[in-house]
Image: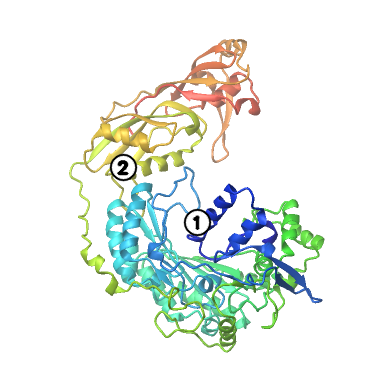
Amino acid sequence: PIADFFDALVVGEGEEVILQLADKWIKWKDYNGKDRNELLKEWAEIKGVYVPSFFKPEYNSFGIMSLIPKYPDYITVRRAVINCLDTATFPEKPIIPYGKPIHDRLRMEISRGCTRGCRFCQAGMIYRPVRERSQKTIIQKTQEALKSTGYEDLSLLSLSTGDYSDIEPLMEHLMTECERERIAVSLPSLRAGTLTPDLMKLIKKVRKTGFTIAPEAGSQRLRNVINKNISENEIIETVQNAFKLGWKVIKLYFMIGLPTETDEDHLAIIELVKKIRHTREKKGKAPHINVSITTFVPKPHTPFQWESQIPPEKAKRIIGQMKESLKLPGVRVKWQNPDVSIIEGLWARGDRRLSSLLLNAYQKGCRFDGWSDQFNCSAWNEACLDEGIDIHFFTARKRSFDEKLPWDNIDSGISKKYLVEEYQKGMGEKITRDCRIDECNQCGVCDFKNILPDIYDGKKNEYMDSVKTPPPPTQTNPVKLTIKYSKTGRARFFGHLEMVNIIIRALKRLKIPVKYSQGFHPKPKISFQDPLPIGMESEVEYMFLNITEPVDRNRMVTGLNKNLPEGLFVHDCSIYSKEKKSSETETLRYRVTSNENIFKKNEVERFQRSETEIITKTDKKGRKKEIDLKRHVSEIKVTDPQCIEIKMNTLQGKKIRPREAIGTIFNLTENEIKPVRIVKLDGLVKSPN
C-alpha cells in the first residue's frame, strides 16, 4: 500500500541490512557517474531489500492485482534474518528524552520469534525462528544500560516472554540486582500457564507492574480454531495466583469476528469474565477486571490471510451486547472503534491503489488516526469514494487459495503450503503443537544450517552459577541533604514532574544511595520547595534529598552538573538543618522582561495610589474568591519600558503568581503577557513538609 512513497524498504530484521544499505549508498554518492537506478539495483542485491519500482502492478477484470517483475533475477524478496540474537547490536547507551515518552523504560529484547503458532498472529509467523539471548548477555547489557540511563523500569521483551528458557533463574538474578536499585521489572507478554506463582513473587518484589492475559476467545472450541493453546483452567488458575499475591487489576484481551465464530462464542467470553471475577478470595477489596475487545483483522503471511473481516455494523452490535452483559461491579469494558478496525483491515490487505488513497485522506485532514478523538471516519469514506476504492473488496471478501495476493512477492520464509494446512486445521478445530517442545512443524523458515532455532537451555547457562549475588542494601547512617540549584534558559520549559524525573535519573546514574519510601509503590525521598510554573526561571531553588549513607558532596555536585541538561545547575549541597518556622509573610523578588515596551510608569503610579486592587480567582472546585493584590505586591519598579523588578508577598501560605499581578497592574492582554520572561531572583530555605 505504501510502495509509491519509498525507493526501497527493508523486509525483516534490519540490524545488518541497514549497514549494507549505508555502505552502498556512500560508495554510490562518492562516484558521480552512477545514476539513481544503479543504486537501486545494488540495493536490490542485498537480502531483505525491496525496491517497489522493480515490480509493475497489473489488474485483471475482477480488480485483483499481480506484480510483474522488471528483472528476471529479482522475482521475490526474502526476509532478512539475524542468525544469532546474542551477537546482535544492542543500544547500551540509548538516548534519554527529557519529556516522558510512551515507553519510558529500558527495553531489553531477550528473545525474538515465537513458536506458539496462533493462526491470527502476524508477528508469530514473520519473526520465526525463535532465537534467545543468553542470560550472560542479557544481564551484562542490562546492567550497562541501566547504569548509563538511570531508568527506574526494566521491561523484558519478546513475543512470549514466559517461554524464554529458564526464565525464573534469569528473573531471580535480575530482581536481586533491581530490588537493590529499586528498579521494577515487567514482563509485558506473558501467557497463562507460563506465569507461575514463583515468577509472580519475583515480579512483585519492587512493585506490582501490570498483569495482562490474552485468552483472545471465550470458548475452548474457538481457541482451538485460532491455535491458542491455553485452557480455561490455566487462565483461571493464573488469575487466582495473581489475586492471592496481591494484584488488584487484571487486564483481559479478547477478539470478536474470528473465523467460525458464533453467538455461543460471544456468550463464552461473558461467562469466562464472570468466572474470573468470582475467583478472588472472599477477604479484602474486590479486584478490578479491565476487559478489552477488538475486532479481528486478517493479516498477510498468516493462515487467516484469506479470511473475511466482519463489517463494522456487526462488530458494533456484538460489542454493544457484551457491554450490557458485563455491567458488573469491578468490571470495565474497553473496545476499539470498529470503524478504526475496518480501516486497519483495508491497510492490512490493500494493494498499490491505496497510495493515492493515503495522500487524498491526508489532504482531507486524516492523521493521528489511532487516537479516537482524531479519527475521522467520514473523511476516510470520502477519500475512498474519490479514489474509487471499495473497502469491502479488501476487507469483507474471502479469498481463494489460488488468488494472487498483493504481498506474494514478499517471502516471509513461511511456505504457502504450511499456511494453507494451518488454515484447514483451524477450520477443523485441530491444534498444532509448539515446535519448541514438540517435533518440527515444517513451516519452511529453518534451513537448519544458517537459520534455525537458537535456544539457551540450562546446560548453556553455567554462567548463572558463577554470578555472585550482591549483598542486600543497608542503611548505615541516613543523611538528609539540602541542594541549592537554578533553573534558567531553556530549562524553564520543563514541567515540574519532568524536572524531577531528570534529577532522579541523574542521581541513579551517579549511584547516589537515595532513600525510598515503603509500601506498594516505593518512591525516592526527595522534595522540592514551591514548584515553579512552567516557563518561569529561577536563580535560587532548593530541594531536599534523603540518602541512606554519607557521600562526597563536592563530587555529587560536580557529577550532577555533568548529568543535568543545560539550564539546570546545582550550586551547593549541604547537610540539612531544620530552619526556624518561617513568618506568616514571605517576600520573593522577580525580574520581568519583555521584547515590547509594555511597562509604563504611570500604571505603576496608579497602582501605588490606589487603596485596593481586587482580582478574582477561581479555585479547582469552581469557587470564586476576591483577593487584594495590594497586599501581595510590596514593591514594583520600572527600570525601563521592557523591564521591571517586583517584590511579592506570600501571606499565610497563599500567593499570587507574578504573571497574574503584572497582567492586572499594566492592563495587559493575554497575548501581551504570554511572551514575558520571569526570573525569580532569590528564595528562602523552608523546611520540607
636 versus 484 height, above or below: above
Colour mapping: rainbow
133 versus 218 height, above or below: above
- Between 185 and 434, the one nearer to me in the picture: 434
**Amino acid at dot 1:** Leu
Residue visible at 53% across and 16% down in the picture: 644
The mark found on residue 510 in the picture is 2
User: Is residue 357 toward the left or the right of residue 278 in the image?
Assistant: right
Which quadrant does the N terminus fall into?
bottom right
- Between 38 and 142, the one nearer to me in the picture: 38
**Amino acid at dot 2:** Leu
- Between 545 and 158, the one nearer to me in the picture: 158
Location of mark 1 (residue): 19
The x and y percentages for residue 491 are 47, 33
Choose top left, top right, bottom left or bottom right for residue 557.
top left
Residues packed near mark 2 inside 10 Å, few (<14), some (14 to 19) or many (20 plus):
some
Cα separation, mark 2 vs mark 1, equals 34 Å
